[in-house]
């Protein structure tokens, strides 16, 4: 199965759950109209629910590099907070040590600070 088809299928399922719509109406989701954040949410949720926390973490930081938005930042914070609620055994099964959660929280806060800093463009501060 190719990535585009996978994303379309997850988009349909996501819309069905989110909007409580029947299958035929969810066919109207157009992948070309989805933002990178929308796609992130779909793939991230799949990875998270499969217990693939390393992949989910990578998705968040890849998106933050491209789109350091408050929405992506919040997804990251929620991710780490939900992992803090997991037992050490659950984390061990997913090869995601607790210390990685704390490190991830530190790393993600750096993106928030970077977002808040003024940006310089052609010697003008924006």
Image: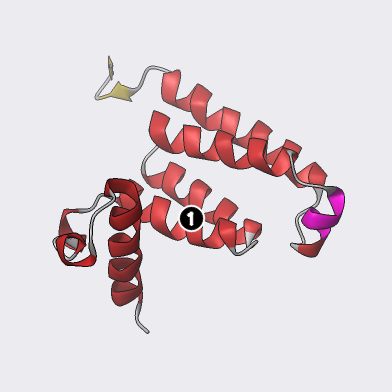
Residue in the image at 41% along x and 29% along y = 70
Give yes or no for residue 34 being in the magenta stretch.
no
Along the horizontal axis of the image, is 85 left or right of 45?
A: right
* 67 with respect to 100 (left or right): left
Question: Horizontal and vertical percent for residue 83?
Answer: 69, 44
**x and y percentages locating residue 5 in the rendered image:** 29, 76
- Residue drawn at point x = 45 percent, y = 42 percent: 64
* Region in magenta: 88-92
On the picture, is 35 further left or further right than 49? left
Indicate the secondary structure of the residue bearing disc 1: helix
In the image, residue 9 above or below residue 77: below
Residue under label 1, please give it. Answer: 44
Q: In which quarter of the image is residue 8?
A: bottom left
**SS assignment for the magenta stretch, majority:** helix
Horizontal and vertical percent position of residue 85: 74, 39
Report crowding for label 1: few under 14, some 14 to 19, many 20 or more residues within 10 A (C-alpha). Answer: many
Residue at 24 percent of width and 24 percent of height:
122
Q: In which quarter of the image is the N terminus?
A: bottom left
List x then y, in percent, for residue 108.
Answer: 58, 35
* Residue that lies at the very extreme toward the right in this rendered image: 89
On screen, 90 above or below 106? Answer: below
Left or right, 11 with respect to 50, comes to left
The answer to whether residue 84 is above or below residue 6 is above
Nearer to us in this view, 19 or 68: 19
């Amino acid at each position: 199965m190719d990535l585009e088809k996978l994303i379309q299928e997850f988009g349909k399922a996501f819309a069905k759950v989110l909007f409580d719509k029947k299958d035929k109406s969810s066919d109207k989701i157009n992948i070309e109209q989805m933002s990178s954040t929308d796609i992130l949410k779909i793939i991230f949720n799949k990875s998270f629910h499969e217990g693939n926390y390393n992949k989910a973490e990578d998705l968040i930081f890849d998106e933050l590099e491209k789109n350091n938005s408050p929405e992506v930042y919040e997804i990251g914070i929620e991710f780490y907070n939900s992992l803090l609620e997991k037992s050490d055994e659950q984390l061990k099964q997913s090869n995601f040590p607790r210390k990685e959660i704390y490190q991830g929280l530190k790393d993600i806060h750096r993106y928030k600070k970077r977002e808040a800093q003024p940006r310089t463009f052609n010697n003008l501060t924006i």
